[in-house]
Image: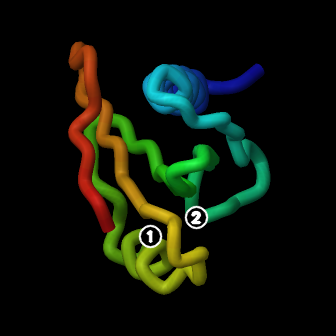
Amino acid sequence: MPNRNYNKGRANEYRTMRILEAVGYRCFRTAGSHSPFDVIGISKAGVVLVQCKSNREPSPADMETMVNFSAPDNATKLVYRWNKGARLPLVKEI
């Protein structure tokens, strides 16, 4: 059975997907792939790559991995930080 941290992270990934889908993205979770990004959103406007975090920032090693990740020119790399009790995430572009 998944632990509490896994459940919280998964719930925040689905919350992220609902936000992106509401503005026209088709979204996919990369659960289990150990990708640097948790959610990928694709639309005519471009691609968003999102790392979701709960109550903390990504580690310096995670940030370096995301910065160095080779992505298409029309891709935007984001961190969605979900703080406890917040209705919306803090969004940071990488």
Does residue 85 appear left or right of residue 2 in this picture?
Answer: left
Which labelled disc corresponds to residue 32? none
Which residue corresponds to the image point at 57% horizontal and 24% vertical from the top-left?
14
Q: Is mark 1 on a helix, strand or loop?
A: helix
Q: In which quarter of the image is the C terminus?
A: bottom left
Q: Position of residue 31 (x, y in %)?
A: 73, 43
Q: Determine which quarter of the picture holds residue 87.
A: top left
- Residue type for callout 1: Asp
Dot placed on the residue nearer the N-terminal end, 1 or 2: 2
Decide: few, some or many residues near mark 2? Use Cα within 10 Å; few <14, some 14-19, many ≥20.
Answer: some
Q: Position of residue 20 (x, y in %)?
A: 48, 32
Q: Which of 27 and 90 is in front in this view?
A: 27
Does residue 23 appear left or right of residue 35 in this picture?
Answer: left
Does residue 45 appear left or right of residue 56 in this picture?
Answer: right
- Residue type for callout 2: Pro
Q: Position of residue 15 (x, y in %)?
A: 48, 22
Decide: few, some or many residues near mark 1? Use Cα within 10 Å; few <14, some 14-19, many ≥20.
Answer: some
Q: Is mark 2 on a helix, strand or loop?
A: loop
Q: In which quarter of the image is the N terminus?
A: top right
User: Is 47 drawn above or below residue 28 in the view shown?
Assistant: below
Q: Identify the residue position indicated by label 1 in the image.
A: 62
Tag 1–tag 2 contact (CB < 8 Å): yes
Alpha carbons under labels 1 and 2: distance apart: 7 Å
Which residue corresponds to the image point at 49% horizontal and 78% vertical from the top-left?
65
Which residue corresponds to the image point at 77% horizontal and 48% vertical from the top-left?
32
Q: Which of 4 and 52 is in front in this view?
A: 52
Q: Nearer the viewer, residue 73 or 44?
A: 44
Q: Where is residue 86 in the image (x, y as percent from the top left)?
A: 22, 18
Q: Nearer the viewer, residue 53 or 2?
A: 53
User: Is 53 drawn above or below residue 60 in the view shown?
Assistant: above
Q: Identify the residue position indicated by label 2 in the image.
A: 36
